[in-house]
Image (cartoon, helix red, strand yellow):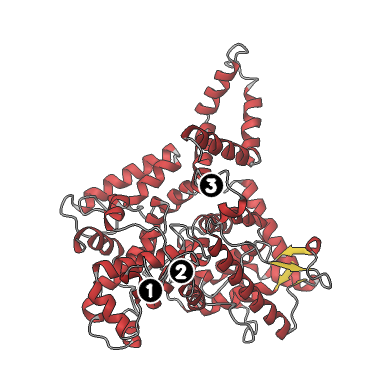
Amino acid sequence: MLGEEEELSVSIAHIVQRLKGSRLHCQLEREARGSLHKPDIKLETLKDDIKEFLKTSGWEKKLQNAVYRELSLLPGPCQSVAPAEHIKEPLSYMRKAQTTWEKRVLKSLNSMCTELNIPLARKRPIDEQKELLSKWNEMGTEEPDLSLFRPVYAPKDFLEVLINLRNPNYDNGELVSFRSQLGLIQVPLNIKDIPELREFFQELNLNTGQLGVDDCTQVPPELFENEHMRIGKKVLAEDDSAAAQQFVRQGCPTSLRAELWALILNISNQAEDILYYEQLKSNVIQHDLLSDNLIYKDVKLTANNDDYYFVFEDYLYQVLLCFSRDTSVLAHFAYNSASPPKSYIRGKLGLEEYAVVYPPNGVIPFHGFSMYVAPLCFLYNEPSKLYQIFREMYVRYFFRLHSISSHISGILSLCLLFESLLQTHLPQLFYHLREIGAQPLRISFKWMVRAFSGYLATDQLLLLWDRILGYDSLEILAVLAAAVFAFRAVNLMEVTSLAAAEAVLADISTLKVIPLLQIFLFAAVS
């Protein structure tokens, strides 16, 4: 075990190494060199003068925000010196399960490729390139025949894998509690209980002002909203990622949300970022991937059928097609339990020197994947910025919702937390649903794996995602899922089948998210 000072040194070294190769590092060097010609920079106090210049010119704040971003992605202190595979996932049986799942997904993709006799990738003829470029902003008008394509997997397929997961070192016969036997998830993981959740989400308590709550007994809503707006503008003026993250725990004013989220995620959309997006677009124009059809199919099946999101069809194609070509996404596999799938050049199967990551970003889209992007279209109308926000949201949060890991925000921990909350605080409801064959997780899993996108009204979903960013955690998804069951408990106690239970919970788009969370965490549960 490392001492506290050693852990800090390892973390600092890791962040310095990461930032050394960044664009910000080059910009800081250029600005520092440029400042040498200023009259107030003296040779005898050079170091201090340059520090002061970087501070007054705003570059120190940019560096601070970049460090804050790296801290949010940093592995735990004990993991910083661990082997690479342990940083990805410390538990060997989880790594094995993830590898097995990846093989299954890749097999599904390869079998589709063989059945349809379509290559994984091909260069588009010049005429086809020109046609795609001319229709780039109206791809939704195209009606390609996608009938033969199918999603490589759906959330329910992934759920079955999680249900069958077991820890081979755990004795199921003795120490396991009766309660854990009742749920579908049978792996022991460290999750929070209600007191710990109350401590963690303390800003959600009933005495703290919140955006998303119509009536507050302490402060009239309009007074709180005006004051919150004033503070929000001040946070933006300060250009401080950490302050913005703390601020959004009480919700974002609608007019400031786009800027505040960009500040938290450290997205600035500079000229280089726009150029990078254009390069990705060029890659889409030049090459056709089999995975593109999976994206088209998913958008048609999900967002296109949604009353809120169908108007953003063109944006979704643009963002997701560019995302599939973005090799910078591969960096997140350093702390993701998953590994990027590989394909081989024809005739060179099994030879590593002929292996290529496929798709280039290492992420195979599944049924519902486009719903991670759709809500962001309400906030950003510039494709390059929309793209950067989504990419950062994905590499920070969304990847955890479709990979097998022991991380506290991983989908497995969220499932266990959801079942634990229901069993502990609504035992009669949980037992009733279990007895009629309507295990609650089979209903709530689709909500959590999509971060509730497509299930809540968009204004409510954005209020929920405010808190994901504010607390830098996905645990609130499991709490909300349990709160929905608590809210509909009376109706659910009367159902006698899974179909009837699903009918009760079929439409949750009218629910108010923040009051539900507050009541469940701080009022309903003792």
Of circles 3 and 2, which is in front? Answer: 3
Relative to 260, residue 13 above or below: above
Q: Which mark is residue 444?
A: 1
Q: Which mark is residue 79?
A: 3
- Nearer-N-terminus badge (2/1): 1
Residue 323: x and y in percent read: 62, 62
Amino acid, disc 1: Ser
Tell whether 213 sits left or right of 335.
left
Callout 3 secondary element: loop
Residue 27: x and y in percent read: 63, 35
Q: Nearer the viewer, residue 38 or 302?
A: 302
Tell whether 172 sits left or right of 107.
left
Relative to 233, residue 475 above or below: below
- Would you say the residues marked 3 and 1 are in contact, meaning their CB atoms lie under 8 Å apart? no
Image quadrant containing the C terminus: bottom left
Q: What residue is pinned by disc 2?
A: 449
Marks 3 and 1, how far apart in space?
A: 32 Å
Mark 2 Cα within 10 Å, few/some/many (few <14, many 20+)? many
Amino acid, disc 3: Gln
Mark 3 Cα within 10 Å, few/some/many (few <14, many 20+)? some
Relative to 430, residue 21 above or below: above
Q: Nearer the viewer, residue 397 or 172?
A: 172
Marks 3 and 2, how far apart in space?
A: 26 Å
